[in-house]
Image (cartoon, helix red, strand yellow):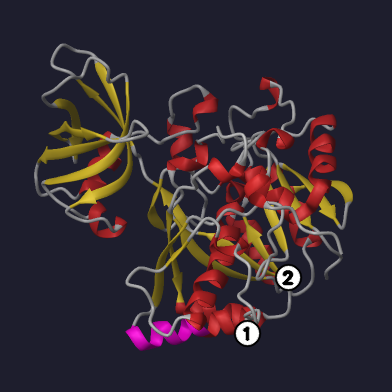
Amino acid sequence: MPTPPDPHQLRIQDFHYDLPAERIAPEPLPDRAASRLLVSRAGVITDKTFRDLPDELPADSLLIFNDTRVVRARLMAQRPTGGVVELFCLEPVAPHRALEPALQQTAACTWRCLVGNGRRWKSGPVSLEFRFAGQPATLWAERQATEAGGESLIDFRWEPSSLPFAEVLRAAGHLPLPPYLHRTDTAADAVRYQTVYAAHEGAVAAPTAGLHFTPELLAELGRRGIATGQVTLHVGAGTFQPVKAETMADHPMHAEPIIVQASLLRQLLAHRPRPVIAVGTTSLRTLESLYWLGAALVRSPTPPAALQVDQWQPYQPLAAGEAEISAEAALQALLAHLEATGSAALEASTRLLIAPGYRFRLVQGLITNFHQPESTLLLLVSALLGTGWRAVYDHALAHRYRFLSYGDSSLLLPSLIG
């Protein structure tokens, strides 16, 4: 058996392909399910439409969706002299670091933000006038500090002060469309840059594999006996960040919060060993993170204060005499932890990097769009398909598939299952 590659030493330039600008989908299709679907089954590629998905899924599949909802995280404020400053809200800092209470915070809060066009914003507040429930409202923002990497801590306050920050963003903010679209969001994006099953606010990018699903298609899956489940991973802005390091050893993965109900853990346990298909890379990273969170609980009798998965955790060799932990044992450890803490849901964070050399524990297949060259998402696809990822992308380019967030989809099944 060949030695798996060391992800630390992977050169990102080995995951390059030429993506012409005209192949990037600037807008969604009028019909979500009319997108094309490339099916790669054990290396055999066929061309379908997304509406054919129920016919292509392995029998007895369990599809796992990410039910995060994109927040209107881009705020266009004005300096007193009239210049526009863009504030892209990344994550809360004070008085809450947890996302849900931070979005319900009233009167004032502090967030870590990316600042655009901010060179002339030296000091003092910038402001944004908006309307809420037909009445005038104002948001003020002041830069507290700039951190390494160019992110800034921004103090926000607003009137009416009784508004939760979530309502401020809904009324005053813009959807953070991917920067490669080179356009501002529209009323159509407010609908189409969300999945039809989006439920929990917190993402600054859509889990785009799910954008192809319609209520009718979800109902058809149910009629076919295809089981479904939901996890929540709030997609961070790091999903847009290119890999700038020559090797992955020097690329830091961003942390993203995940929330998984105990009922989903029980569903995964009951479903084994039948196939689990992740709808999108964020669902896949969440599922695989569950294994590493559970494995850590098995190995440590005293759980840490905050559950998290490190970027390189999967690639650490087992200690001498240490046995591999099964997926069942990891899931059972998570359920035992929730029972011991009286919690109905697991809350954690993950920096998991899935790259060639990774061995999948919970997932057997993936539904996903076509990703940017030299991206961590393409590394994930390569980890699943091996070198076959190039055949998939060469086929998609040759057959004029649409790429990236509003583009077409693929069903990737590395082995013959179902």
User: Dot 2 lies on which element?
Assistant: loop
Determine whether 353 is above or below 297 in the image. above
Determine whether 19 is above or below 215 in the image. above
Tag on residue 26? none
Q: Quadrant of residue 14?
A: top right
Crowd tier of the residue under label 1, counting other residues whose Cα lies within 10 Å: few below 14, some 14–19, many 20 or above? few
Q: Is residue 358 left or right of residue 175?
A: right
Q: Nearer the viewer, residue 395 or 314?
A: 314
Q: Where residue 304 sits: x, y (%)?
A: 36, 73
- The residue to which callout 2 is attached is 224
Q: Where residue 186 sits: x, y (%)?
A: 44, 29
- Give the CA separation, mark 2 to mark 1: 19 Å
Q: Residue drawn 42% across and 35% down? A: 176
User: Dot 1 lies on which element?
Assistant: helix
The residue under label 2 is which amino acid type?
A: Arg
Q: Quadrant of residue 140?
A: top left
Q: Is residue 159 visible?
A: yes
Magenta region, main secondary structure: helix
The magenta segment is 333-342
Q: Residue drawn 60% across and 75% down? A: 319
Crowd tier of the residue under label 2, counting other residues whose Cα lies within 10 Å: few below 14, some 14–19, many 20 or above? few
Determine whether 61 is above or below 344 in the image. above
Q: Nearer the viewer, residue 172 or 187?
A: 172
Q: Residue drawn 29% across and 59% down? A: 98
Residue 339 on the magenta segment: yes
- The residue to which callout 1 is attached is 270
> Which quadrant holds the N terminus?
bottom right
Residue 356 on the magenta segment: no
